[in-house]
């Protein structure tokens, strides 16, 4: 058993899984969490790396699911928390089912906020710990045809900055990773494969994971993954919101709408 423990949510595929691979390579024992059985498949690929790999299959959109994770952790000190679990939802807001958009908010905002509070209380008491929160450059612009998702990422981006300020005099660091479109299961699960952004070339998940991990290890406040996304993030600070919404519409509006 290693002396360091990393907890990674949304670790069955994509960015979370790639971060798990990096953490295992750096000698962290792992607790991997996702809301699907595929978490076991992901964990199996990391067995034999010399670290202990545990899994939790839980719905992190609920307090009960997060409590399952907290019970698995028990009293063990957590050195790294990667709050990566997230859910997307495309198409026009007025056409979305209430249950669908509520699931996005409960996963990205409510569940993540709850878990962060529980874990940060413990890290602050230890005066040690590193947290990586997966935000998005989507949080920097009005998300026409992806409105709820972008709103939740705006919350996470802002929330991470606030937490960092509150904990600046402790041994706990907060880093927010802000990817752009990344080659993961996200767009398929968000029902966005009929959109320009769903079909375009995307950033490699391993590159995004490495960017976030390295920034967290350095204690960087936030990091945008990818040169193109850095430019887009910079543009978002000077372009009017009405134009940003139109730009996002061009990326996220489904064919035929």
Image (cartoon, rainbow, N blue to C red):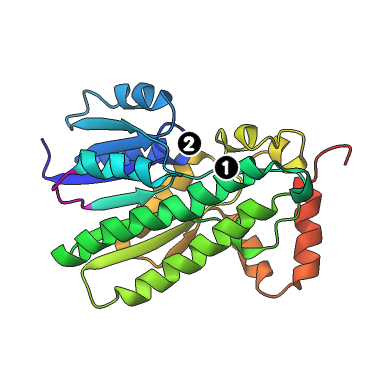
- Tag on residue 14? 2
In the image, residue 220 sits, relative to residue 36, either above or below, namely below
Where's residue 214, x and y in %? 35, 54
Question: In this view of the protein, which residue sits in the foreground, 136 or 209?
Answer: 136
**Mark 1 burial class by Cα count in 10 Å: few <14, some 14-19, many 20+:** many
Residue 172 position by quadrant: bottom left
**Residue located beneath label 1 in the image:** 182
Where's residue 257, x and y in %? 88, 42
Check disc 1 and report its element: helix, strand or loop.
loop
Magenta stretch: includes residue 75: yes
Q: Is residue 245 visible?
A: yes
For the image shown, how many numbered marks are present on the structure?
A: 2
Please give the name of the residue rendered at 46% of the width and 61% of the height, measured from the top-left corner: 223
Q: Position of 156 compared to 98: left or right?
A: left
Q: Position of 104 compared to 92: left or right?
A: left
In the image, residue 217 sits, relative to residue 124, either above or below, namely above
Dominant secondary structure of the residues highlighted in magenta in the image: loop
Where's residue 208, x and y in %? 48, 47
């Amino acid at each position: 058993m290693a002396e360091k423990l990393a907890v990674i949510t949304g670790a069955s595929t994509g960015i979370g899984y790639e971060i798990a691979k990096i953490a295992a390579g750096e000698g962290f024992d792992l607790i991997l969490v996702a809301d699907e059985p595929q978490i076991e498949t992901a964990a199996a690929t990391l067995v034999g790396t010399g670290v202990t790999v545990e899994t939790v299959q839980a719905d992190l959109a609920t307090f009960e699911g997060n409590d399952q994770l907290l019970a698995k952790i028990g009293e063990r000190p957590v050195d790294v928390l990667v709050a990566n679990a997230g859910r997307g939802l495309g198409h026009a807001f007025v056409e979305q089912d209430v249950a669908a958009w509520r699931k996005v908010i409960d996963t990205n905002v409510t569940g993540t906020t709850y878990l962060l509070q529980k874990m940060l209380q413990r890290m602050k008491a230890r005066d040690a710990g590193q947290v990586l929160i997966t935000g998005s450059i989507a949080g920097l612009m009005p998300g026409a045809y992806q409105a709820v998702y972008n709103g939740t990422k705006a919350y996470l981006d802002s929330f991470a900055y606030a937490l960092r300020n509150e904990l600046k005099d402790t041994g706990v660091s907060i880093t927010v990773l802000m990817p752009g479109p990344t080659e993961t299961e996200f767009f398929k699960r968000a029902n966005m494969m009929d959109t320009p952004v769903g079909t375009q070339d995307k950033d490699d998940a391993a590159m995004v994971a490495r960017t976030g991990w390295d920034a967290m290890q350095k204690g960087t406040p936030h990091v945008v993954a990818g040169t193109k996304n850095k430019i887009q993030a910079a543009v978002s600070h000077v372009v009017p919101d009405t134009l940003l919404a139109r730009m996002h519409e061009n990326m996220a509006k489904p064919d035929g709408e």
